[in-house]
Image (tube, rainbow, N blue to C red):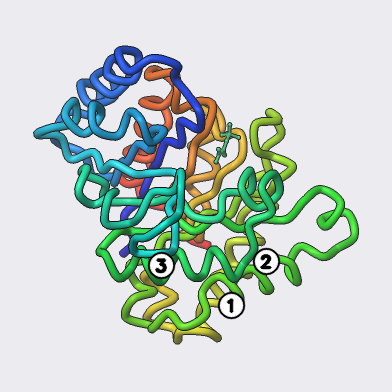
């Protein structure tokens, strides 16, 4: 049985370390100890250390938003996976659409980062998703299939069981538009089927596939209740403790009541 996983992507926020500490403390207090969903927060690089300190004693995981594929060397401005582990990270977001579309990150680059992340013991959250134009051209499945083939190349079934995927339709990120539960579930079911083909049924049944794209406290319950949606990658709402905690609460509710039979 897959445990729901709610992760917060703070993107390039907040501006000050003391605000990051306050945000982490609020989430930590709200989550407490007794959670039956997985939770992680992913601050920007400069706040990873102070947020790690703030989260001490909490079950909340710490994630970075990117890393370099290289282990070390002359890569000015870059951050290695080993550095992330040393500062306390357990997770790393890879291939976020703002990097794929804003910075031209390719499936091959995401794949290299993924293999490096697995090598240093980080849990990767690999983002995939189609643009609005691709959806309107009925290319959603071919785009997602291509992203999965390229991003997951060379990953063993055993490794894949520990990889988290995040389906984030680009048109729904930061726009206030959310895929309907039926639209999201249809793509998640496609992803699960693709994982069966690539890694076998046993592995596919273990892989956490989050949904991301304007998830809020008031739409989380029906999204998380879908059979193949195993959590959420949350951007804007993760910057407001009450909203993020509301999404976590929705995950707790779905966990307690069980998903409706599909
Ligand atoms: C994200 O940043 O991954 C995201 C889904 O953002 P938002 O929730 O703001 O759409």
Residue 117, horizontal then vertical, whole percent = 35, 63
Name the mark on residue 99. none
> Tag 3, which secondary structure?
loop
- Relative to residue 123, is residue 58 drawn left or right? left
Front residue (pair 84, 154): 84
Q: Quadrant of ligand 1?
A: top right
- CA–CA distance in space, label 2 to label 1: 9 Å
Foreground pick, 258 / 204:
204
Q: Which residue is mark 3?
A: 207
Outermost residue to the left:
57
Other-residue count near label 3 (Cα within 10 Å), few / some / many at <14 / 14–19 / ≥20: some
Check whether the beta carbons of the residues at disc 2 and disc 1 lie within 8 A of each other: yes
Quadrant housing the N terminus: bottom left
Disc with the residue nearer the chain's start (3 vs 1): 1
**Of the image marks 3 and 2, the number of the one nearer the N terminus:** 2
Residue lying at 42% horizontally and 52% vertically, measured from the top left? 67
| Residue to which mark 1 is pinned | 194
Q: Which residue is mark 2?
A: 144
Q: Is residue 244 above or below residue 109?
A: above
Residue at screen point 25% across, 29% down:
51
Query: Where residue 14 sits in the image (x, y, percent)?
Result: 44, 19
């Amino acid at each position: 049985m897959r445990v729901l996983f709610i992760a917060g992507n703070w993107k390039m926020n907040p501006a000050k370390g003391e605000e990051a500490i306050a945000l982490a403390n609020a989430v930590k207090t709200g989550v407490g100890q007794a959670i039956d969903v997985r939770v992680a927060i992913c601050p920007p690089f400069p706040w990873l250390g102070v947020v790690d300190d703030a989260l001490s004693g909490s079950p909340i995981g710490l994630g970075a938003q990117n890393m370099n594929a290289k282990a070390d060397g002359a890569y000015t401005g870059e951050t290695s996976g080993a550095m992330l582990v040393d500062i306390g990270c357990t997770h790393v977001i890879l291939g976020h659409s703002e990097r794929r579309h804003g910075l031209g990150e390719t499936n091959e680059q995401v794949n290299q980062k993924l293999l490096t992340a697995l090598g240093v013991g980080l849990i990767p959250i690999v983002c995939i998703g189609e643009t609005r134009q691709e959806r309107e051209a009925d290319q959603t499945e071919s785009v997602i299939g291509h992203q999965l083939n390229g991003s997951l190349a060379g990953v063993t079934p055993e490794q894949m069981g520990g990889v988290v995927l995040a389906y984030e339709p680009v048109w729904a990120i930061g726009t206030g538009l959310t895929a309907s539960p039926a639209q999201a579930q249809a793509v998640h079911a496609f992803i699960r089927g693709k994982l069966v083909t690539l890694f076998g049924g046993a592995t596919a049944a273990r892989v956490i596939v989050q949904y991301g794209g304007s998830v809020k406290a008031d739409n989380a319950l029906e999204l998380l209740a879908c059979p193949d949606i195993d959590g959420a990658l949350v951007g804007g709402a993760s910057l407001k403790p009450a909203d993020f905690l509301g999404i976590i609460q929705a995950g707790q509710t779905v966990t307690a009541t069980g998903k409706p039979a599909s």
